[in-house]
Image (cartoon, coloured by chain):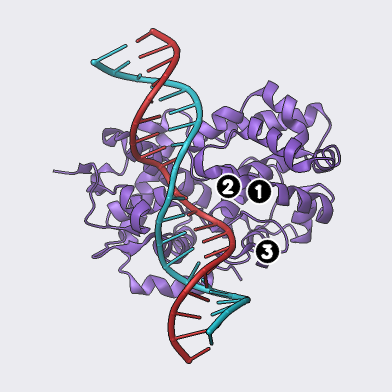
Chain colours: A purple, B cyan, C red
DNA sequence: GCTTGCAAGGCTGGCCTATG
DNA sequence: CATAGGCCAGCCTTGCAAGC
């Protein structure tokens, strides 16, 4: 049972225009497929990193390396520019120098005298986490210990314990939305969005075969949510808590739409995220495949102030 | 004067436990 | 029983400096 399924009832509290949401997704997918507008350049910032990690794993005859590295890296994909972040860490020489931090036994054993000092400094040097994402470092250490002690330093053992089932992997990582660390007996720092993102990448780049990969749904964030709101697929009459929209309304809706229309969650995720982040951030409305359905641009500010999506806040853009 | 690159920066709701 | 307080996933924008 996916943790989100029980939340479907929240949908009924908001007037979802599923037909319109379907149209938005179809246009977004068409834009992605055509590779035009802001889909003309690379819209998969994680791809070059995964490629050099795969290469390093092959060179060093370490089958677990790429998966371990991706698992340990994904929690940093938060509160910062994803493209910037992957550009920073995608450097073969840099990865070569710091690859040991992804090898749990080496990283932990070689730094036993001062694990927090040596390992923490190496992580800072490698990831160079900006701003809020520094917070991820503490839990990063915790996850490395869990990987070492409970899963013999190989994330594939964690997958096997989840019966190689993508849905069980997500449930095991999330436990429940907003779970406390003390509730999480295993890995931390993976919530509903990041857990789905990780599984999506594992499947997309064929790093490991997980069954039911198509069943976990779409990793929903601010960018994706605002595309649906701006296009009136979710018409709001008053400010609504962003968390309610992203996790209680959109997550189940995307799963339904994908199942009903045969959309691939990964493609929906990529297409909408690119539109929301690249398109809206850079105000390239002329390049946007859903421009004809969109009538405003929701500002980021209300989210920071009250955690709300405000339908009256049209930010820096309103269609004439 | 422009673009590009970089780094720094808090707040929320909902759940839980502890306290009176 | 009420309420106070702790906890935590999740979330890019902005201002400055350097390079053209």
State whether discs 3 and 1 lie on one chain.
Answer: yes
Q: Is residue A103 above or below residue A179?
A: above
Direction from residue A249 to residue A196 in the image, left or right: right
Give the residue at mark 2: A135
* Mark 3 crowdedness (10 Å alpha carbons): few <14, some 14-19, many ≥20: some
3 and 1 marks in contact (CB < 8 Å): no
Give the residue at mark 1: A138
| The quarter of the displayed image where residue C19 is located | top left
**Mark 1 falls on what kind of element?**
helix
Q: x%, y% of residue A140?
A: 67, 47
Chain to which the residue tagged by mark 2 belongs? A
Chain to which the residue tagged by mark 1 belongs? A
Q: Is residue C11 above or below residue A192?
A: above
Indicate which disc, 3 or 2, sits on the residue closer to the N terminus. 2
Residue in view at x 23 percent, y 52 percent: A313
Q: x%, y% of residue A217?
A: 53, 58
Residue A149 at least partly seen: yes
Q: Is residue A191 above or below residue A73?
A: below
State whether discs 3 and 2 lie on one chain.
Answer: yes
Q: x%, y% of residue A149?
A: 83, 53
Q: Nearer the viewer, mark 3 or mark 1?
A: 1
Q: CA distance from mark 3 to mark 1?
A: 15 Å
Q: Nearer the viewer, residue A146 or C18?
A: C18
State whether discs 1 and 2 lie on one chain.
Answer: yes
Q: Total of numbered circles in the picture?
A: 3
1 and 2 marks in contact (CB < 8 Å): yes
Give the residue at mark 3: A184
């Amino acid at each position: 049972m996916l943790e989100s399924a029980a939340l479907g009832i929240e949908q009924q509290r908001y007037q979802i225009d599923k037909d319109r949401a379907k149209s938005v997704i179809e246009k977004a997918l068409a834009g992605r497929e055509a590779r035009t507008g802001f889909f003309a350049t690379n819209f998969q910032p994680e791809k070059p990193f995964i490629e050099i990690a795969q290469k390093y794993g092959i060179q060093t005859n370490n089958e677990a390396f790429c998966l371990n590295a991706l698992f340990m890296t994904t929690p940093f994909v938060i509160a910062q520019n994803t493209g910037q972040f992957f550009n920073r860490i995608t450097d073969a020489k840099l990865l070569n120098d710091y690859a040991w931090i992804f090898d749990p036994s080496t990283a932990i054993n070689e730094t036993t005298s001062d694990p927090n000092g040596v390992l923490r400094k190496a992580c800072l040097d490698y990831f160079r986490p900006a701003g809020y994402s520094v917070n991820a470092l503490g839990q990063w250490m915790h996850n490395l210990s869990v990987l070492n002690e409970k899963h013999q330093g190989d994330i594939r053992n964690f997958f096997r314990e989840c019966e190689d089932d993508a849905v069980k992997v997500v449930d095991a990582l999330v436990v429940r939305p907003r779970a406390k660390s003390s509730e999480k007996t295993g890995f931390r720092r993976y919530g509903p969005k990041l857990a789905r993102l990780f599984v999506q990448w594992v499947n997309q780049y064929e790093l490991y075969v997980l069954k039911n990969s198509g069943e976990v749904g779409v990793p929903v964030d601010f960018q994706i949510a605002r595309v649906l709101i701006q296009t009136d697929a979710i018409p709001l009459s008053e400010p609504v808590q962003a968390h309610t929209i992203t996790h209680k309304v959109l997550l189940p809706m995307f799963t339904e739409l994908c199942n009903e229309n045969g959309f691939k969650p990964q493609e929906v995720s990529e297409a909408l995220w690119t539109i929301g982040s690249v398109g809206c951030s850079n105000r390239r409305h002329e390049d946007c495949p859903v421009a004809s359905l969109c009538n405003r641009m929701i500002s980021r500010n209300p989210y920071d102030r009250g955690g709300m999506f405000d339908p009256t806040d049209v930010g820096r853009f309103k269609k004439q």
